[in-house]
DNA sequence: TTCTGGTTTGACACCGGTGTCCATGACGGA
DNA sequence: TCCGTCATGGACACCGGTGTCAAACCAGAA
């Protein structure tokens, strides 16, 4: 072994007086190997600080140890939380995380992603909402021999290929809690049509109202697109209703911030005149005034589980797919003050 | 070539009646090649939809086409912006982006990163603040034969290995603008000690005050740690001063949001009683009330340039390293009302 | 016609691992 | 003592590219 060069399997084999293949067996923990031989080789590996070359392994095994994170998600905190969760699982393994932001409105998106998976010979990919809802895309990835795990808010796939938050339940609970606080007219800001998360949250709202024996009123409901401006517009509509709500549930935090602005524009105080609940617990939630009561879902733990399902399916595929969210009670929602 | 298998260089060679090596020359655009041969081979490549296997290339070239993004950065938006910028440059190349969040307080951080670079045989890495300021780390990466480009807010390295925002200038301009608006008592919330960005913003503040002929007053200055809570504490201190400021410059948006809370706690109106300027233009800035006037720096363009310096140094290394930021004027800073 | 020199191409080893299959040797039973 | 069996380890080809070096080819000059 030349000085300054990384040791290879050949160096290890030569120094320990065995063949490459035997070293390979040690590395791969093959059971049909004499204990003494194993220890001898392991000693040399330790001495040389030998690390197998992943490129060579990838070539021989025809599979790269790369997990792809494919997303088109506007929520930076969520994406970063996912990255951290995946790293929690794959740190200290031979896997690495490669990321690929995409544009879901591009007509070539599926083609682009296929090219990416094929070129990098990805081991597996994780799809984030909203593109995780795209069955065609998931199938295209699988056709390439790539394991796919999808993150979502509903049953998009079987347990081995899904991690999901139980949004419906979480919203239902939040609305029921508002009702307990005495609110009778509860407004709703929906997310964009076509998003499963938006749909689930809508169902959760309906469920929560039903639990509380309240009837949803279309005059104090509006649809937004998860962006701040749409929340502002929704808030303006709801608050100018003849019989305005005393509480509003918004399908995400950003729109909730918009509702808050709308209330302030009308000179209303939050939470005294209007209680607001958001969803996601993004950084905004804690930093607006008043701090937003919101639903937090365990992104990082979910992503860690997803990564486990990708990298060691034999042990992790059957782990639960659904994760419970909880209500973070801050100052923006209080009991009804007539 | 078996059905369903990806074509290899051998398939291309056989079908076009030339040797592997000639195909390799075509792929690598070698100049010493007959035009007719080149076209013949290219036709076969197109027909087979052949894509070279990056693992095999990586093995032969002893260098992987992976760019690492190493960071320990609490600002999700910034990290995601960087990722998008890097992708702007490397999309449609053979490079891929692998990410690695780390913990800068871990005593084994440098060792962990070395292991990561070595294991994945990274082509280059990009370091984000605050760890981009760690010279020992940068050197360790370079010793591994890995190109390093650092992102920062000051001259951390030479042009070929640096992209930086000119924070000092930006803050100086912002403060000078406050002075133009008639503010005489301008408070300052500094970032954490030991952060170059914090230091640069401090110098910018001093410079701006000097330009306006104002003298900084330590009684209306405080140090925070870039977190919301520290901004809140700083705001409480500054606003309870015997002679409180009419405007406050905060070294980042999150602390500015804290200052805003502090003002509101004391029953002050923003911007009527107090003007506030932040730094970074994160999502918070646009979504708090009132929307925050802040300094925006071109993260995505900077990251794209950094990626170019990593992946094609021959053309990009000499591109400018410094990027100008600009002041985003929203509602939180207005002229001085006595 | 033969030689020369430049251009174009190919044979072969190599990068650092893994899979296949066979050789070896120890051990137990006949 | 001899043979069959099983545990163990090695030889060799292969994964799909690239580097080296020499051979083949071609045109123009002697």
Image: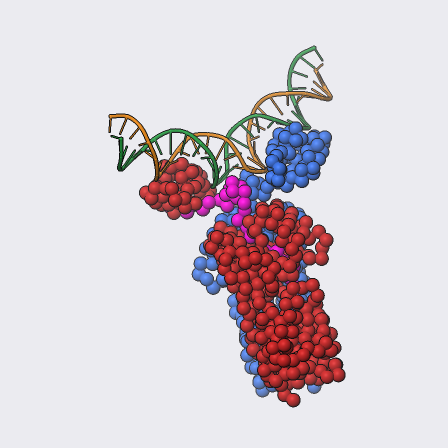
Chain colours: A blue, B red, C orange, D green
Nearer-the-camera pick, A126 or B165: B165
Nearer-the-camera pick, B183 or B27: B183
* Residue B58 inside the magenta-drawn segment: yes
Q: Is residue B330 visible?
A: yes
The residue lying at 52 percent from left, 67 percent from top is A194
Q: Position of residue A230 (x, y in %)?
A: 54, 75
Considering only vertical position in the picture, is A77 above or below A31? below
Considering only vertical position in the picture, is B328 above or below B26? below
Q: Is residue A274 left or right of residue C10?
A: right
The residue lying at 58 percent from left, 79 percent from top is B177
Q: Position of residue A89 (x, y in %)?
A: 66, 52
Q: Is residue A253 visible?
A: no
Considering only vertical position in the picture, is B13 above or below B129? above
Q: Position of residue A219 (x, y in %)?
A: 56, 81
Which image quarter holds the N terminus of chain B? top left
* Residue B92 inside the magenta-drawn segment: no
Q: Position of residue A143 (x, y in %)?
A: 50, 49
The magenta region covers B47-74
Q: Quadrant of residue D22?
A: top left
The residue lying at 44 percent from left, 61 percent from top is A107
The residue lying at 65 percent from left, 89 percent from top is B338
Considering only vertical position in the picture, is A150 above or below C6? below
């Amino acid at each position: 072994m030349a000085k300054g060069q990384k040791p290879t399997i050949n160096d290890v084999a030569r120094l320990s007086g065995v063949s490459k293949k035997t070293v390979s067996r040690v590395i791969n923990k093959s059971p049909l190997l004499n204990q003494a031989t194993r220890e001898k080789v392991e000693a040399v590996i330790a001495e040389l600080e030998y690390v197998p070359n992943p490129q060579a392994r990838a070539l021989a095994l025809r599979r790269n140890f790369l997990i792809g994170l494919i997303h088109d998600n506007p929520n930076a905190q969520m994406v970063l939380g996912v990255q951290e969760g995946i790293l929690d699982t794959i740190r200290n393994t031979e896997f690495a995380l490669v990321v690929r932001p995409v544009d879901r409105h591009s007509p070539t998106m599926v083609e682009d992603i296929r090219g990416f998976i094929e070129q990098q010979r990805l081991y597996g990919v994780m799809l984030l909402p909203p593109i995780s809802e795209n069955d065609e895309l998931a199938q295209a990835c699988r056709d390439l021999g790539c394991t796919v795990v999808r993150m979502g808010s509903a049953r998009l796939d079987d347990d081995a290929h899904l991690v999901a938050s139980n949004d419906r339940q979480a919203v239902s609970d939040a609305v029921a809690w508002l009702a307990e606080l005495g609110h009778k007219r509860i407004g709703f800001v929906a997310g964009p049509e076509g998003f499963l998360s938006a749909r689930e949250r809508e169902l959760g709202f309906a469920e929560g109202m039903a639990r509380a024996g309240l009837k949803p009123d279309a005059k104090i409901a509006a649809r937004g697109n998860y962006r701040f401006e749409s929340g502002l517009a929704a808030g303006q509509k709801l608050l100018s209703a003849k019989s305005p709500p005393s509480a509003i549930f918004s399908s995400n935090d950003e729109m909730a911030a918009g509702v808050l602005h709308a209330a302030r524009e009308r000179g209303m105080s939050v939470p005294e005149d209007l209680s607001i609940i958001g969803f996601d617990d993004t950084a905004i939630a804690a930093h607006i005034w008043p701090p937003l009561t919101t639903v937090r879902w365990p992104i990082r733990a979910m992503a860690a589980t997803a990564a486990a399902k990708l990298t060691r399916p034999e042990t992790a595929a059957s782990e639960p797919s659904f994760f419970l969210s909880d209500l973070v009670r801050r100052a923006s929602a209080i009991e009804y003050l007539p």
